[in-house]
Image (cartoon, grey):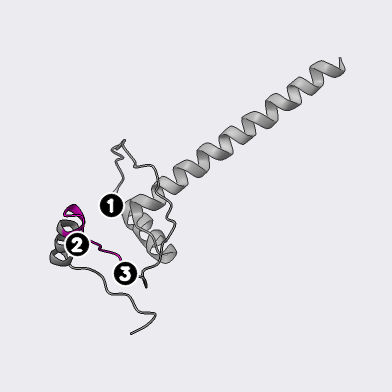
Amino acid sequence: MPGTRRKASGEDADSIARQFDAGEKVWSDRDQILDIEVKKPLDKVIPVRLTSETWTRLRREATELGVGPTTLARMWILERLRNSASRRGSRSGAATSKRRSA
């Protein structure tokens, strides 16, 4: 059916890989080329200790936002780091302006 996609099973994927390795044509004229963005893999894990109550609150908040609790914690950490860096940048910019005017 046009416009529908079928997800390849592991067996289908293995068959396609074998055909490709053998030099056979594995793409059809109807296949589309898609540009995808590949994100840098996360390679550091930090243990964070929370009380059961705090974990429950974090999980509840994450569920309301449609993300997992560890994703939400990571988002909050990154947001805080960005805010901290921008505050430092604006303070150093103000100090530089004061020095120049003196």
Q: Nearer the viewer, residue 9 or 21?
A: 21
Residue at the extreme right of the image, as rendered:
101
Q: Which is more foreground, mark 2 or mark 1?
A: 2
The answer to which of marks 2 and 1 sits earlier in the sequence is: 2
Residue 21's x, y, as percent? 18, 52
Find disc 3 in the rendering and name its residue.
28
Q: On the rendered structure, is 31 left or right of 80? A: left
Q: Can you say which quadrant of the picture contains the N terminus?
A: bottom left
Give yes or no for residue 102 being in the magenta stretch: no
The answer to which of marks 3 and 2 sits earlier in the sequence is: 2
Find disc 1 in the rendering and name its residue.
52
Whole-number angstrom distance, CA of label 2 to CA of label 1: 47 Å
Q: Nearer the viewer, residue 92 or 11?
A: 11
Q: On the rendered structure, is 53 left or right of 22? A: right
Q: Nearer the viewer, residue 26 or 61?
A: 26
Whole-number angstrom distance, CA of label 3 to CA of label 1: 53 Å
Q: Which residues are magenta?
A: 19-27
Q: Residues within 10 Å of mark 1 (few under 14, many from 20)?
A: few
Residue 36's x, y, as percent? 42, 55
Residue 32's x, y, as percent? 40, 67
| Callout 1 secondary element | helix
Q: Which is more foreground, mark 3 or mark 1?
A: 3
Residue 16, disc:
2
The residue under the point 51% across, 44% down is 79
Callout 2 touching callout 1 (CB < 8 Å): no
The kind of residue tagged 3 is Ser
Q: Residues within 10 Å of mark 3 (few under 14, many from 20)?
A: few
